[in-house]
Image (cartoon, rainbow, N blue to C red):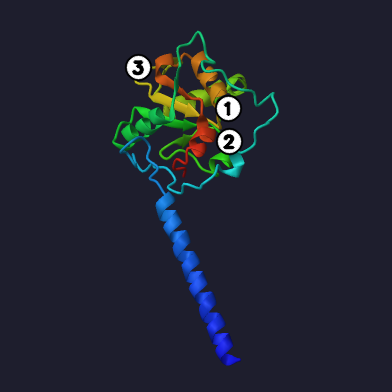
Amino acid sequence: MKLRTIFTSAAVAVALASTGAIAEGHNKKGAKPVGIVKGVMEVAGISRNQDNGATIDPDFAKTSRPCPPFCIQPTEPFLPAAVDTVTELDMIHAARDRANGDSNIVLVDARTPGWVKKGTIPGSVNVPFTKVNSKALAKDPMAVVDIMTKDFGVKDMDGVLNYDNAKTLYLFCNGSWCGQSPASIRALLSMGYPQDKIKYYRGGMNAWKSLGLTAK
């Protein structure tokens, strides 16, 4: 009886070891590097998830958010203002330049703090759209001006806003169904912020997460 138990245990151990070896071999065989672009694995601390089996974050998996307010944003929602719509690579390069000391670039997460806690683009700052939108302007325009002078390089010259040293802003929110960063952009444009210094990342965190890019 004891011998049978020993032989059975040994057989199970061999089987488990064999299964593990097969699984390990499968992982090694199936795993392929996930670069940002060909030959580039990381930029300014930003990379992509190397797990080939990874799936999108459940927080961004909903397909049918009610519209309004979560309607699909057009590619150029600010016409006739010439605000560039940018891609993930543009955001990565902006983060790189910012990390390398270019203080004239600001990545702006326009979402509310609760969403930011779930992960944001490295190097970005949170300026919630609730503080920079048409309602905020109507309620307390000077509070918006304070943000612009403190964070965006605008100068308040006795009530006249000077944009000579205004920073280039890369605004984003939760993606093509999210109107938060567009609301902030429209408010900034109404205040005279230079349109060539505003960039709109339409894909937002939904696209960022779907590509497995680093979020902090």
- Binning the other alpha carbons within 10 Å of mark 2 as few (below 14), some (14 to 19) or many (20 upward) gives some
Is disc 1 in contact with disc 2, using a CB cutoff of under 8 Å? yes
Residues at marks 1 and 2, CA–CA distance in whole angstroms: 9 Å
Q: Residue 72 bears which disc, if any?
A: none
Give, as a three-letter code, the residue at label 1: Gln
Residue 194 visible in the shown view: no
Q: Residue at x 47, y 37 (%)?
A: 211
Closest to the camera, between mark 3 and mark 2, is 2
Residue shown at the point (51%, 70%) measured from the top left: 16
Q: Amino acid at mark 2?
A: Thr
Crowdedness near tag 3: few (<14), some (14–19) or many (≥20) residues, C-alpha within 10 Å:
few
x, y percent for residue 150: 43, 29
Q: CA distance from mark 3 to mark 2?
A: 29 Å
Judged from the image, the secondary structure of the residue bearing numbered disc 1 is helix
Q: Which residue is mark 3?
A: 164
User: Which kind of residue does numbered mark 3 sit on?
Assistant: Asp
Q: Which of disc 2 and disc 3 is earlier in sequence? A: 2
**Which numbered tag is attached to residue 180?**
1
* Residue sitting at the far top: 80
Depth order, front residue of 73/48 = 48
> Residue at position x 46%, y 31% from top?
108
Q: Position of residue 146 (x, y in %)?
A: 48, 27
Looking at the picture, does residue 105 appear above or below residue 214? above
- The residue to which callout 2 is attached is 112
Classify mark 2: helix, strand or loop: loop
At horizontal 51% and vertical 71% (from top left) the residue drawn is 15
